[in-house]
Image (cartoon, grey):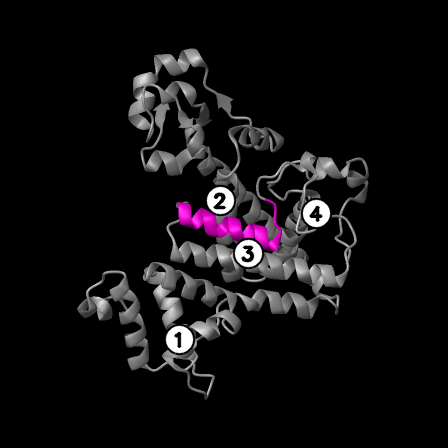
């Protein structure tokens, strides 16, 4: 499989130049040849990662410690890059950091082909990639964040120490979590207010002369808006060129399968004729449940509670595999009671 593009542009760039940062905007498409087996493996593993991002976001509060720990474990198991230095050349699980970054790059573009076909697919893909990007950007050190901004020409003006001092009280008042001491340690960026409308709307920044003064920990909001805009435009362009790709008989079945594999199965339709008991659920979850339902079941057993979206997904799944209404109520009641929820209120939560 060869990704079309301007091959001459790549010849002048070394491999380290292409993957010199563990995070990227995916602006340059891959221009190398890969096998169909690698094509499928990369695509499936990124789908697993994105679906895990979706499910963990349902089960846990985004950016919480538990949320971050679960995602970090998934990055490790699927061998995607997070925050390791490329120059270290460390090999974990038999895969170098360069290979992880290469897989991250190629797999993103493969899923673009699969998920550009309809508005619903594009919306799902953009949301998961944004959540993934937000987590990865938040894991970077301040130096790597600055390097990423410069590498992608996001050269926001840094507020000088003198200006910070003169605006100290106003910056403290408008920026969450800052004090008289920390405001001097934080970098602030001066950004045109129209590029920070989300922060302006929620009153998280100080405005002066048409500029928003954004503390370093909030710059992710601006970067995410840029990432979303670029990805949305890229998906629209990919959709226009899709007929050329679909004419390849080797790729069409695979892309079709990928684009439907994670749209969401209709569990409201009874497809099985067998019955399961409550005692079988734990054993079946480990060997037979799809990965997304396995994560929800594990989160429920660990925390004895799921957020509303998770309860809806998992409840429909249990119905789909043959659990009766009475069994389902018994199952949820036993878990919620362990989480100190009054048994009489169980029905209200379902």
Q: Distance from label 3 to label 2 (Cα)?
A: 13 Å
Q: Which mark is residue 99?
A: 4
Dot 3: what SS? helix
- Picture residue at 50% right of the left edge, 22% below the top: 157
Residue designated by label 1: 318
Horizontally, residue 275 falls left or right of residue 350, namely: right
Q: Tell me which numbered mark, 3 or 2, is placed earlier along the sequence.
A: 3
Task: Place residue 298 in its image quadrant.
Answer: bottom left
Q: Distance from label 3 to label 4 (Cα)?
A: 17 Å
Dot 4: what SS? helix
Horizontally, residue 222 falls left or right of residue 209, namely: right
Residue in the foreground of this view, choosing between 294 and 198: 294
Task: Place residue 314 in its image quadrant.
Answer: bottom left
Q: Tell me which numbered mark, 2 or 4, is placed earlier along the sequence.
A: 4
Per the rendered image, the range of residues in magenta is 65-81
Q: Which mark is residue 135?
A: 2
Identify whether 20 is placed above or below 57. above
- Picture residue at 19% right of the left edge, 65% below the top: 342
């Amino acid at each position: 499989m060869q990704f079309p593009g301007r091959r001459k542009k790549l010849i002048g760039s070394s491999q380290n130049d292409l993957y010199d940062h563990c995070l990227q905007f995916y602006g340059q498409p891959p221009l190398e040849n890969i096998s169909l087996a690698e094509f499928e493996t990369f695509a499936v593993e990124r789908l697993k990662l994105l679906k895990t991002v979706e499910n963990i976001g349902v089960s846990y509060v985004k950016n919480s410690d538990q949320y971050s720990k679960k995602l970090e474990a998934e990055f490790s198991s699927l061998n995607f890059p997070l925050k390791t230095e490329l120059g270290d050349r460390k090999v974990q699980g038999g895969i170098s950091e360069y290979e992880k970054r290469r897989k991250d790059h190629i797999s993103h573009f493969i899923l673009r082909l699969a998920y550009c076909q309809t508005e619903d697919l594009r919306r799902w893909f953009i949301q998961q990639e944004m959540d993934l990007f937000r987590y990865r950007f938040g894991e970077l050190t301040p130096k790597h964040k600055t390097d990423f901004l410069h590498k992608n020409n996001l050269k926001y003006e840094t507020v000088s120490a003198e200006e910070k001092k003169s605006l100290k009280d106003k910056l403290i008042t408008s920026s969450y979590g800052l004090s008289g001491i920390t405001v001097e340690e934080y970098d602030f960026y001066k950004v045109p207010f129209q590029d920070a409308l989300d922060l302006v709307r929620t009153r998280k920044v100080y405005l002066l002369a048409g500029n928003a003064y954004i503390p370093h920990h909030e710059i992710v909001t601006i970067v995410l808006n840029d990432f979303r805009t670029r990805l949305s435009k890229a998906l629209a362009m990919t959709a226009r060129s899709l007929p050329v790709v679909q004419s390849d008989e080797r790729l069409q079945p695979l892309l079709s399968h990928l684009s439907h594999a994670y749209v969401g199965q209709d569990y409201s339709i009874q497809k099985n004729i067998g019955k399961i008991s409550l005692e079988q659920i734990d054993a079946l979850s480990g060997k037979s449940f799809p990965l997304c339902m396995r994560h929800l079941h594990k989160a429920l057993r660990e925390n004895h509670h799921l957020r509303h979206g998770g309860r809806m997904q998992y409840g429909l799944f249990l119905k789909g595999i043959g659990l009766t209404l009475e069994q389902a109520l018994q199952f949820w009641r036993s878990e919620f009671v362990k989480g100190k929820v009054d048994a009489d209120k169980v029905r209200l939560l379902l």
